[in-house]
Amino acid sequence: MSTNAIKEVSERLVKAGRELHEQGLVRGTSGNISAKIPGTNTFLIKASGVRMRFLKPEELVLVDLQGNKVKGELNVSLETPIHSAVYGARSDVQAVVHTHASTATAFGIAKTEILPLQVEMFMLLPKGVPVVSFEQPGSEALAEAVQRKIMGYDAVILENHGVVTVGSTIEAACNLNGMVEEAAKIQFLAMTLAGRDVLDLAKLKEKFKTENTLE
Ligand SMILES: [Zn+2]
């Protein structure tokens, strides 16, 4: 296995961890992030109990696709089963980001899906972001529930817990996490102003389609 590949992925994960903190998507030791090592059946994941803001390469643990530790000093993140389950289900996914971003998490508590009400969000997540029913953190049941839902979506909300996003790169998975939080804020504000009228997805599809055609 190429140590260069591991080094490159480590550096990108460290940078991504800092950016997730800067965007206010993670605090303290919450949240986790992982990325596959290209051409292998392994991925690097943040260790348990370390802070995303100050993440260091030695605080990443190399695991196989079943989540067993291959290399690293520290214990793997509690939510490693989610990451393993996603990679098992989606060969196109190269990175997984899990945060407790506050507004999106509130939507999970309210059991309310996030809809693509804003045009850029519509292009990125046309089906919106569904809520996965509550299961205990770190459990296989939670990993399985995420796995079932992630087949059809690149972002899911975990009821009373947080957000999981995936991507073909570390940066894409991180950006999507920020986009979900932004969409949650917009939906909350729009519903505060105009109630449930803003949630008519059929009307939105028609509107965005028409505008695209005109461009
Ligand atoms: Zn969590």
Image (spheres, rainbow, N blue to C red):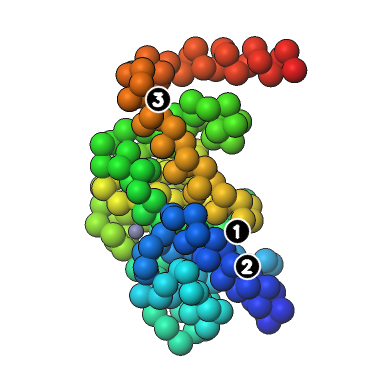
Q: Is residue 121 above or below residue 209?
A: below
What is the C-alpha distance between the residues marked 2 and 1? 7 Å
Whether pointer 3 and pointer 2 mark residues with C-beta atoms closer than 8 Å, the reply is no
Q: Which residue is mark 1?
A: 170
- Residue 122 is left or right of residue 149, and the answer is right
Q: Earlier in the sequence, mark 3 or mark 2?
A: 2
- For image coordinates 49% across by 29% down, the residue present is 116
Q: In the image shown, does 170 or 92 lie closer to the viewer?
A: 170
What is the C-alpha distance between the residues marked 3 and 2? 35 Å
Q: Is residue 47 above or below residue 129?
A: below
Q: Is residue 166 above or below residue 49?
A: above
Q: Which numbered disc, 3 or 1, marks the residue closer to the eye?
A: 3
Q: Earlier in the sequence, mark 2 or mark 1?
A: 2
Whether pointer 2 and pointer 1 mark residues with C-beta atoms closer than 8 Å, the reply is yes
- For image coordinates 48% across by 14% down, the residue present is 202
What is the C-alpha distance between the residues marked 3 and 1? 30 Å
Q: Which residue is mark 2?
A: 12
Q: Which numbered disc, 3 or 2, marks the residue closer to the eye?
A: 3
**Circle 2 sits in a helix, a strand or a loop, which is it?**
helix
Q: Which residue is mark 3?
A: 190
Residue 197 seen from this side? yes
Q: In the image shown, does 96 or 186 lie closer to the viewer?
A: 186
- For image coordinates 36% across by 21% down, the residue present is 193
Question: Image quarter for residue 140?
Answer: bottom left
Q: Earlier in the sequence, mark 3 or mark 1?
A: 1
- For image coordinates 59% across by 36% down, the residue present is 124
Q: Position of residue 62 (x, y in %)?
A: 53, 76
**Circle 1 sits in a helix, a strand or a loop, which is it?**
helix
Q: Position of residue 4 (x, y in %)?
A: 71, 79
* Amino acid type, label 3: Ala
* Amino acid type, label 1: Ile
* Amino acid type, label 2: Arg
